[in-house]
Structure formats: structure tokens, C-alpha cells
Amino acid sequence: MVGDHAAPRPLPLFLALVRNVAERDPDLARRALHGLHSYMEAPRPKPRISRPKFAEVKGASLRDHGGHGRPLILVPSLINPPHILDLDEETSLAGSLSKTHRIMLLDWGKAADRAAENVAQHIERILLPLIAALDVPPLLVGYCLGGTMAMAAAQLTPVAGVATLAAPWRFSAYDGKARDALAAIWRDSRGTSGQLGAMPMEVLQAAFWALDPDRTVAKFAAFGALNPTSDEACRFVVMEDWANQGEPLPLPAAEELFDRLFADDAPGQGNWTVSGKMMSDNLPCPALHCLARGDHIVPAATAPQGRKVQINSGHVGMIVGRARHDLHRQLTDFFQTLA
């Protein structure tokens, strides 16, 4: 589904970012606030219809997007809703890949149904059983943290191949400023998250903004100058709604993400155990890692070792922007070599 009709409320952190910008560029701050107002008042499209469930485990499900050929599971991040991979008819990655494969989009479902699971247990107790529901080993395509998780799954059960899209593996390759900002957000939110049993989506979005605060302000300033009825403006609204919505991150998953992955770089150091097995980026199946050249959320330096291609885009632009055509072509070519 594309999302609710109501706009998310602006977060205090965004307003704090604008205040910081105003000290050095008052005009940019003014335009960003205008853009924020335009975004809040923009009409929302009707939600896309949810696809039928093929299999379900702990409230998570494989949504059947049709197509023919070897099954392919799209594995989204735990952090944002899965529909970024099926945003609309024009940009849908699921739709593009369904021309050559039977597409299953993993919907992680409600956080309450997996409240006790850390990241590794999401792989062991949810992703692996969903893979086992298919008759033949599938292809896995994982986006962001979903790519990290897909790589782990490929080491625990037979799959035909893995493609990752802007997926981090070597977390120590984040620059020091970004790591410090993420550590501070986790430190400041840990108590509240502990009381709630989950890390709220608002805090997760703040973590993303902390990786590139200037771009966050600038994109709202640019949006305010668009024709509000243009396709570009409408897509901006849908994408921002997606970025600001989603389930909270279960507390055990948040603890593992911030303490073991970001702080300790357990995957990159060869010290991440999933289902009793030490994980590596040397996979037992063919793999392709697609990197976004302008990615500030998952910089290219954090990518796994192995065969890589660079897409001339940002983190989300490679999925729904003009660069998606290059991504679709790279994936199609890779899968053809496996056929």
C-alpha cells in the first residue's frame, strides 16, 4: 500500500535542522519551511491494493506479485514499509522483475508479532521459513538492511543467487561523524525505546536525517518550488510519506543494529553469528552488489566484497528515480547469466 491519506506530522528534529540552517542561510530555511507546509497540505493518492499472501510466518508474509519463472523474493529493510519496491506502476521494481520471474515481496508485518526477535532472529525465524515455503531455491534481492539479511540467509539455506541494493556489510566504513551521530541518537533514545519495547519510527527517521542533514533541508526547499500537481511533486509526497511511516523496530533488533552492527561492525569484522553460523560476505552462490554512487545513507564503501556495479543515484533514487532503469538492466543481465 502506498500509505495513509493523512500526512505524517513534522518531526521536531526536522524543525531543529531548519533552525540550524537558518543561522547560515536564512533564505534556504524559509524555502524549506514553505516546502514542508506544501508537503503537509498536499493531497494523498489512494493506497495501492495489497497483494495476496503466499505464505506467512509470525505475521510476516510473502506477497504474491505474479510473474513466471524462478521465484524471486524481494527483501526490504526492517525499518521502512516494503512498498518502496512497488511504489507505483511506473517505478515498481516488483513489476519490472515479474516479466522474467515469479515475484514475492516480503512484508514484515506488525512489529508486535515479532517483538522478541533481533536482526539475526528475523532471518532465522522468519526469512528462512518463508524461503522454505517455495518449491525451489529462489533468488533473493535485498534492499538496504534487507540486503544484509538476504546475504545471511543465503549462507543458511540453498538459494539460486543474491543481489543486494545499497546494502551495508562493512559498517566501520561509515565516516566518524555519521557513526557519532547514530551513536548519540541511540544513546538518547535507548531508555524510551526500552520502556516501549521498540524503537519508534520517528527516532529511526531522525537517525537517517543525521546521516545527511543538509540534504534533508535542501530537498524540502526544492519541493516547495515545484508545481504541486506535477508528477515529480506527487512522487515526492508518496516517497516522503513512505520514509516517515512504518512499524517501530523491535527493541532486540534495534539493540543488535546499533550495538553489534553499527558500533562493533560485527559483519565486517567476521564476527556476526546467525543461527549458530559465522557470517561472511563470501557467499556460496552467485552474488551481485548494486551500489548507489551518491548514497549518504549506505555509502558505497560499506558494501560487501564481491562483484559490484555502481548506479549513478542516491539511496532511494536507485529504486524509484531515473536511475532505476539502469538498476533494472543490471539485475536482468545478472539473472540471465544464472539461467
Image (cartoon, rainbow, N blue to C red):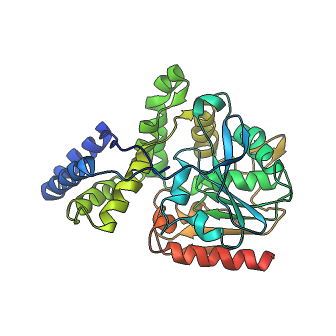
Which residue: 29% across, 37% down? 12
Residue 188 sits in quarter:
top left
Between 97 and 202, the one nearer to me in the picture? 97
For the C terminus, give its image quadrant: bottom right
Which residue: 65% across, 32% down? 114
- Relative height, residue 98 to residue 176 (above, below): below
Between 12 and 187, the one nearer to me in the picture? 12
Between 168 and 248, the one nearer to me in the picture? 248
Residue 57: x %, y % from top left: 73, 38
Which residue: 41% across, 56% down? 239
Which residue: 66% across, 68% down? 98
The answer to whether residue 169 shows anywhere in this view is: no
Between 339 and 309, the one nearer to me in the picture? 339
Position of residue 252 in the picture relative to residue 292 (left or right) = right
Residue 143 sits in quarter:
bottom right
Position of residue 164 in the picture relative to residue 225 (left or right) = right
